[in-house]
Structures are given as structure tokens and as C-alpha cells.
Amino acid sequence: MGSITRDRGCLYYVPWLATLCVIIAVTSLGVWAYFTKRCEDLTLGALDDLGISAKELNRINPALVATAITYLSLTLVIYFMSLWRSFIEANHDATGVTGGGALAFLVLSFLLLCCWWLVVVWLVLLVMANTVWAAALYVTHGASKQALAATASFGAATWLPSSDLPCPGQCLDLTQLVFMASELQDACICDTDKLAAARDSFKHAYNQIPGLAVGNWGMLAAGVWLLMNFACQFSHTKREREILIRVATRIYSGI
């Protein structure tokens, strides 16, 4: 029987794909966090200009912090697991026998794979949430812009707080924007100064969306690649361990 040991050189065991995934993941996380925070601040500024609030907007900051901590922590843990896998493979190649580290690696890898699947699902939901956020900003900016254009064409208008009086076309009708939270007295905004300030703020907030989306999709892509790479490492380690155990059993049975 031929030798089951081999020497592949140090560079072979470096987890190059995992390293690339981690670099993309950490960079994308920084981009996403920066533009998300910037977009949140501009959105809050626009709402303050109008004197109103938006539903569920207060959940963005806790979600940002929780996502950043969880994503970064698990990414680094999985990368260290990839390094561990490299040492296990090098040991298998050098000695031709399996050690207890391989079994521990398999158990921990299975748990981490389950956790990372949940993270990837969360990133998909995050893409959907950011898309809804972008749509809300686009619609609100367009409504503010339309109200100002109507004011320039037909003159300013006023509105008295009443459920029986429709909101004039020169005003921003918040009852049509279901994602906004406002009282009856604030449901129709005709103040051109407020509308102009809010229009600019909503536009600036919307301009942050491309950077936010690039970071979000980068996190998702890196997460999927890292998941596939880690699953392959789990599979290869399991297969190597099974083969080496069978080889060792045949050798000892022959003795």
C-alpha cells in the first residue's frame, strides 16, 4: 500500500477563499453601517423638518448594532475555524492519522453552520427592508416635490385640521403615506419652508441608498461564499477522518 502522508507546502494550507470572504465581509459591513447611519440621520432630520415621525424608524439603530456585532463576530469565528481546518488537514497529511481535534472541529462547525444560515436569512430580510426604506424615501420626496411645484403654479394654500376637508394639492397629504405617523393637525402640511427643507433632506437620504445597497449586497455575497466554503471544509474534514479511521483499522487488523 502506498504512503498516505504527503507534503504540500505551507501556502497550500492557507485558507485563501475564506480570507477573501472575510475581507469582503468586513469592508461591506463598514460601508453598510456608515450609509445606514447616515441615511437614518437624514431621514430623521427630514421628519423633524415636517414635525412628524415614521413608523418603525426607531428600530433601525438597534438592528444596525445587533447586525454589525453578530455578523462581525461570527465572520471572525468562522475564519478562525477555517484556520483550524488548515492545521487539521496539515496534520492529516503529515501523520496519516486522525486526532481528537477533527471531531471537535466537526461538532463546532455544525453548530456554526446552523447559526450562519440564520445570519444569511437575516441578510436577505435586510435587503428587503432596505428596499422598502428606499421606496418610502422616494415616494415622500416625490410627494414633497409635487406639492412645491403645485404651490409655484397655483399659489400657496391653507388647510384647517378637519377630517371633512380634503388636503389641497399644494400641500403634503400624510394620510396617503401609510408609513408616516401623524396627528390630525399635522396630517396636511402646507408650509413651503417645511416642505422645501424636507424635500432636500429626503433627497439626500435617498442618495445614501446606493452605498447602503452595495454594502448590504456585499455582506450577503460574502456570507453566502463563506457559508459554502465552510460547508465544504466540514465535508472534507468528515471524509478525511472517516478514511483515515478505516485505514488505521485495516492496518491494525492486519497486524
Image (cartoon, grey):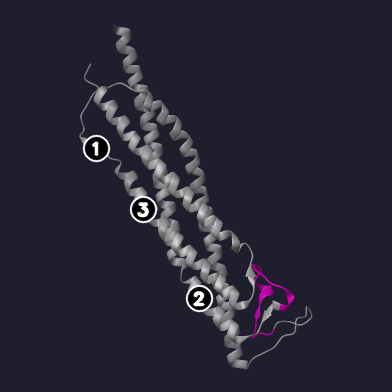
Label 1 to label 3: alpha-carbon separation: 21 Å
Q: Position of residue 124 (x, y in %)?
A: 51, 53
Give the secondary structure at mark 1: helix
Q: Is residue 174 left or right of residue 123?
A: right
Residue at left offset 56%, top offset 63%? 132
The residue singled out by tag 2 in the image is 203
Quadrant of the snapshot with the C terminus:
top left
Label 1 to label 2: alpha-carbon separation: 50 Å
Placement of 28 over or under 54, stated as above or below: above
Neighbour class for label 3 at 10 Å: few (<14), some, many (≥20)? some
The residue singled out by tag 1 in the image is 12
Residue 25 lies in the magenta-colored region: no
Three-letter amino acid code at the position of disc 2: Lys
Placement of 185 over or under 36, stated as above or below: below
Placement of 88 over or under 186, stated as above or below: above
Q: Is residue 254 visible?
A: yes
Q: Is residue 146 visible?
A: no
The mark found on residue 24 in the picture is: 3
Q: Position of residue 161 (x, y in %)?
A: 75, 81
Q: Which residues are magenta?
A: 168-185
Q: Earlier in the sequence, mark 1 or mark 3?
A: 1
